[in-house]
Amino acid sequence: MSRMTRLTCAATLLAALGAGIGAAAAQGQPGVSADAIKIGTFGALTGPGYLYGKLAMNGIDVVFDEVNKAGGVNGRKLQLIREDDRCDPATAITAVQKLIHQEQVFALIGGGCSNATFAARETIEQAKIPFVVVASVHDGITQPPAANIFSMALTSSIESQAQLAFALQEGAKKIAVISMRDSWGRARYLPLMEAFKAKGITPVADEEMSPDANDATAQVLRLKATGADAVIMVLFPKPAAIFARDAQKLGFKPILIGQTGIGDPAAFEDQVGVPGATAKFTTISMVKYTPTDPAVDKWRTLIEAKFPGDRLSNFNLFGIGAAQALVEALKRAGPDITREKVIDALAGLKDLVIDVYPGPISCSQTDHRCNKFPAWISKEPGGPIKVLSITRVE
Amino acid sequence: MTMLSYLLLSGITTGALYALVALGLVVVNKATGVINFAQGELFMVAGFIAWSIHVQFGFDFALALAGAVLVGFVLGCAIDRIAFRPLLRADVVAIVLATVGISFMLKGIGRIIWGGKGDYLSFPPITSTDPIMLGEIVLVPQQIAVLAGAIAIMLAFGAFFRFTRIGKMMQATADNAKAATLVGIRIERIYTLAFGTGAAVAAAAAVLAAPLTLLYPDMGFSFFIKGFAAAVVGGLTSLPGAVVGGLAIGIVEALAGGYIHSSMMEVSAFIAIMLVLLIRPTGLLSFYKARRV
């Protein structure tokens, strides 16, 4: 054997050994085998929050199916394991613990209801498991940044800044706020007030509604008395619908500015139930397409084939976007995948274009709020949902 | 003046719904001495039953109302059989806990059946959505319909206890169960009827409320709390008291929200309750009755 041949053999042997050690290291990771990676997801499968849970999970599912059809991530198929958190903080902690310790998943993707995801943050952070947030917006989930948690959702402070920016962009002179003051509402309300302060503006009125409110006559009358021409709504769909209905009833017709909590203008129009009451309603979407857009035909076909009876919704698209970001990080982590490598890959995502998001995804070691491009959507009464504009929040 | 009239109208309409929930609680409490903590969830289930009949299957609103009331009545009777009758000799705390358990069970069922059909389900208005102008005041036909329906149910309820044989038997059992037994009233049946009637009233309230509010599986608790508060204000065993309590809470909420601040809406009703209980610990309309001997 010549010297050259011996060297080649040695190099090949070393490479094989290295790959073997790498594969062994990867297989030593929880949830990783030679041919599969177990990914856990949690969110509401039942109850009002199922839109941000179950439907987003369906979106993740079809992305994983597509990846698996194409051969998987570096040869490993992705396997999604779902847990129901019922939008409940205590249940979310249990769900996450089950996924991490019992199911031994490699990474997490999910989180629909902010309060539930926020409650689970500590457990996830301690486990040092990569976690990609799909739809929960609470700032506390990503601020201060946990090394292993990255959000593909718009966060509450980003949305609040965008709401004020939109009101000003629309030429509003008298801006009022109506908000819920539970933990979901406060997570948005406080950054909103900071945004007002930063712009040197004082809202003309600052009213409250409870999540279970059945009447908004008092709030509407108080706001109407101030002559507000724009109302920033930090409300769930139910109180928001009651407010819009009563505003129409009492002849109060300002611009109504929503956020992703009221992310489906078609459902909102139906919930308000009074013709014309949503004519001046505009809200934020995390995605740049509406479900009827031909650009998302591919996803519509996949969702409707896998989940018969379902129609593609924005909430599916939330899951689709976040899943694509996670898949990219898994790929970048390489064949000898470890949790640390995936976390590094997530932190290194920069200007990543994902087809459903309004702008590129950029994370960093210090900022894990990776999506900063809210899209503004509205629906003319009886007409389709339209994307009006995209705001970039710094 | 216009603001006051708007606030009073909205307060009375919302209060009438609280009063109906309170009536259901009082009927059960009068007959059995137990607060049915599943009352809010019965309200929720009945609302969804009506939604399924009217929206999902396209039947008339009247049929939806009848169906929901019937299902409510049957569920109420079932609660008597499951959570009350077997525990008749147990401590009252055990019975209350059993009704709490039933409430969780009903919420779970609601989540499974209707929880995946939309975040909040809307119920189509039963009247025109065009407002009616009465001078400077805007009246919403839907609100008027709800108010009229609530008043009709309250009057029917009053007539049931005053003029029907069964109603009188329920009154007798509520006044003195042992004496009722001695005169041949089968009080177990009265208990069943009380649970059934209480649930049927909650069901009627839910169907009336459905077009004004939105339906979701967790909606029961807030209505229960307001209904319970109304019942407490009224004296827990007084049917007129439940009505007065419900209306009072609705009006206090609306006026506090309109004239002080919207943040006071939730708090004001409970401040009012504390004041009422400080001044009249037995409630507004709960009087000690003189007995003939």
Image (spheres, rainbow, N blue to C red):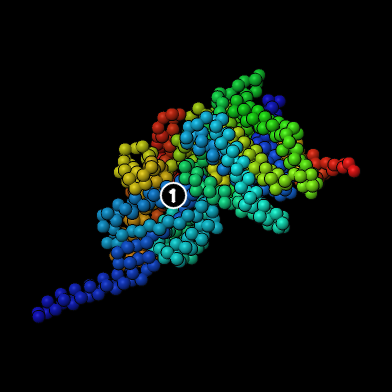
Chain hosting mark 1: A
Disc 1 residue type (three-letter): Lys
Would you identify the image quadrant in which residue B292 lies?
Answer: top right
Disc 1: which residue: A54
The answer to whether one can see residue A95 in this image is: yes
Q: Which of A282 and B121 is in front in this view?
A: B121
Rate crowding at label 1 as few (under 14), some (14 to 19) or many (20 or more) other CA atoms within 10 Å.
Answer: many
- Quarter of the picture containing the C terminus of chain B is top right
Which residue is at a point 50% across and 44% down the rendered structure image?
B114
Q: Position of residue B188 (x, y in %)?
A: 70, 48
Image quarter (top left, top right, bottom left or bottom right) of the N terminus of chain B: top right
Q: Which residue is drawn at 69% across and 43% down?
A: B194
Taking the view exactly as shown, the residue that stands out farthest to the left is A2
Number of labels in the image equals 1
Q: How far across and down, in percent of the image, does residue B40 sit? A: 62, 44
Q: Residue at x 33, y 71 (%)?
A: A25
Question: Where is residue B54 shown, x and y percent of the image?
Answer: 51, 33
